[in-house]
Amino acid sequence: MNTSPAVLVDVDGAVATIKMNVADRRNVLNPVLRQGLSDAFDAALTNDSVRCVVLAANGTVFGAGQDFAAVEDFNILAADLINVHYKPLLLKIHNSPKPVIAAVNGLCVGMSASLALACDLLIMDENAELSFSFSKFGLAPDGGASWHLVNLLGAKRAFQILAESKAISAQQALQLGIANKVYQGESLLVAACEWAEQIATVAPLSLRFAKAAVRKATDLDLADAISMEAELQQICSESSETKAAMAAFLTRKK
């Protein structure tokens, strides 16, 4: 299921692993890698056997952000580069019905950090770092970094991270609630895939609606969130998947 030499894709049971493979360039997000990622996610998200996706990277760096040396991007306006060439990929991950786990090894900078935050769950190697260092280059945050950080941390902490441009260690990311887990061991990817396999055992409709509810809740007040959950619950209650699960539960209770 490989789509490009820049991206390696492997499907093992219900888990698809999408691995950035431009280690010699620190996995910078050049046009080839961007397109490879988009194609890989299209393939994984339309594969009915896949229930969870892991995004990882070969080499010692998860991603060095936008490739400022990419000649193909030189004549593209900054706003067009983001809106046309990054936004669709970021929203594809954010809005996908299947959960995506980012397995961050090493340094993760700028747009690469925004890519990691677009994923539903984040596991980091103990030596990994997130860096939203836009201000060091006189740039504004991009790729949804401001939105994710505000929703995760609140406005004051989000602004502090963006203004100071300091790298965030894995342990700091865990304490702040940016990362879900920090892995201390030899194979971060194995740990991420084991986690994905565990999540993939959850009933598909339940998993899909849990993600949808969490994503939508940030834009709703409590009353509307309850109503939104009620609509999703109604769909679940009428599904054969839920009926079978409930019947099995009641049988065990007898």
Image (cartoon, helix red, strand yellow):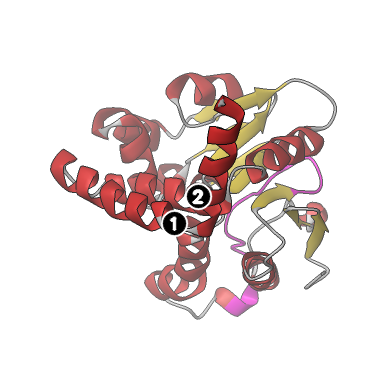
- Density class for disc 2 (Cα within 10 Å; few <14, some 14-19, many ≥20) is some
Q: Secondary structure at mark 1?
A: loop
Image x and y of residue 191, in percent: 76, 32
> Is residue 130 shown to the viewer in this render?
yes
- Density class for disc 1 (Cα within 10 Å; few <14, some 14-19, many ≥20) is many
Image x and y of residue 112, in percent: 57, 51
In the image, 65: left or right of 162? right
Sequence order check, earlier mark of 1 and 2 = 1
The magenta stretch is 57-72
Q: From mark 1 to mark 2, how far is it between C-alphas?
A: 37 Å
- What secondary structure is the stretch in magenta mostly built from? loop
Q: Is residue 155 above or below residue 12?
A: above
Residue identified by numbered label 1:
143
* Residue 46 on the magenta span: no
Q: Secondary structure at mark 2?
A: helix
Residue type at numbered disc 2: Thr
Image marks 1 and 2: residues in contact by CB distance under 8 Å: no
